[in-house]
Image: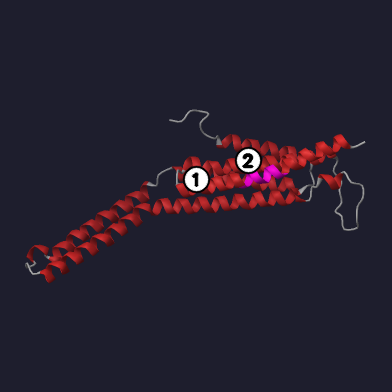
């Protein structure tokens, strides 16, 4: 049984997201980032329920799979009896023909059993990959929101007619970027819930890719936050 601090708490992740949403709305009530965070909360709740469901074995499906395997085994026995291998004469052509038919039946039966027994795992794996795709899309949306938040433009008074309107102070820009970074980190934690609940190699690799993505996007944001501090120190 894992210890209390050896697993992520899904409830704490959602609570942290809700608090983050309240902070964003309080400081930037008209910004689209708050709506993105609200959608992330809803997606996170779905992910929590889905990850918990995927961790539970599907006994109904496993019972059906067991029944199919048993039926296939009975069919194999009937097929072997139909071949009447014990009545085959000692001539080589007849013996080889009977053995070839028996081996073909065994191979087909083994493939069918493997397909049935692994179908539950493959269905769950596809559901996880679909969920991670939704989280990945949200991560890129968050990255788009911070993309135009350039510290050098905010600190530069020279603008062109094509320059977007900049209304944030240095402190507000820092907070905005920090909120984006927190959202990306929480997306990584939501992704990790699936790896904890379903120890499948493909799922773990996909979750690792998600964590690499969110970490890389977050690193770009923190480079901007660091640059804001450097430029403020250099300002007269």
Q: Nearer the viewer, mark 2 or mark 1?
A: 1
**Which residues fall within the magenta stretch?**
213-220
Residue 102 located left or right of residue 24: left
The residue pinned by badge 1 equals 204
User: Label 2: how many residues lie within 10 Å, few (<14), some (14-19) or many (20+)?
Assistant: many
Position of residue 11 in the picture relative to residue 198 (left or right):
right
Residue under the image location 79 percent in, 40 percent down: 227
Dominant SS in magenta: helix
The quadrant the N terminus occupies is: top left
Q: Position of residue 115 (x, y in %)?
A: 35, 57
Residue 198 in sight from this viewpoint: yes
Q: Which residue is mark 2?
A: 186
Residue drawn where x is 47% and y is 51% of the image:
125
Pick the residue in front: 195 or 32.
Answer: 195
In the rendered image, which quarter is residue 114 located in?
Answer: bottom left
Specify whether residue 26 is in view.
Answer: no
Separation (CA) of disc 2 from disc 1: 17 Å
Q: Secondary structure at mark 1?
A: helix
Residue 100 circle label: none
* Cβ atoms under marks 2 and 1 closer than 8 Å: no
Q: Residues within 10 Å of mark 1 (few under 14, many from 20)?
A: some
In the rendered structure, does residue 217 fall within the stretch colored magenta?
Answer: yes
| Rendered position, 11 above or below 194 | above
SS for dot 2: helix
Coloring applied to the structure:
secondary structure
Between 205 and 34, the one nearer to me in the picture: 205
């Amino acid at each position: 049984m894992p210890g209390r601090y050896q697993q992520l708490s899904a409830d704490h992740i959602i609570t942290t997201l809700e608090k983050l949403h309240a902070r964003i709305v309080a400081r930037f009530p008209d910004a689209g980032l708050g709506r993105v965070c609200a959608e992330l909360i809803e997606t996170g709740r779905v992910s929590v329920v889905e990850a918990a469901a995927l961790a539970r074995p599907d006994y109904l499906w496993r019972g059906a799979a067991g029944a199919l395997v048993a039926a296939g085994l009975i069919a194999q026995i009937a097929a072997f009896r139909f071949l009447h291998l014990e009545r085959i004469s000692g001539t080589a052509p007849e013996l080889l023909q009977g053995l070839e038919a028996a081996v073909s039946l065994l191979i087909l039966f083994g493939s069918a059993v493997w397909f049935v027994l692994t179908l539950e795992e493959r269905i769950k794996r596809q559901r996880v990959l679909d969920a991670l795709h939704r989280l990945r899309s949200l991560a890129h949306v968050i990255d788009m929101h911070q993309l135009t938040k350039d510290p050098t433009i905010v600190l530069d008074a020279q603008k062109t007619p094509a320059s977007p309107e900049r209304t944030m102070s240095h402190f507000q820009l820092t907070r905005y970027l920090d909120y984006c970074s927190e959202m990306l980190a929480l997306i990584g934690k939501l992704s990790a819930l699936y790896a904890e609940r379903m120890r499948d190699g493909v799922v773990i690799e996909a979750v690792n890719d998600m964590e690499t993505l969110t970490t890389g996007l977050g690193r770009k944001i923190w480079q901007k936050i660091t640059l804001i501090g450097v430029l403020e120190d250099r300002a007269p």
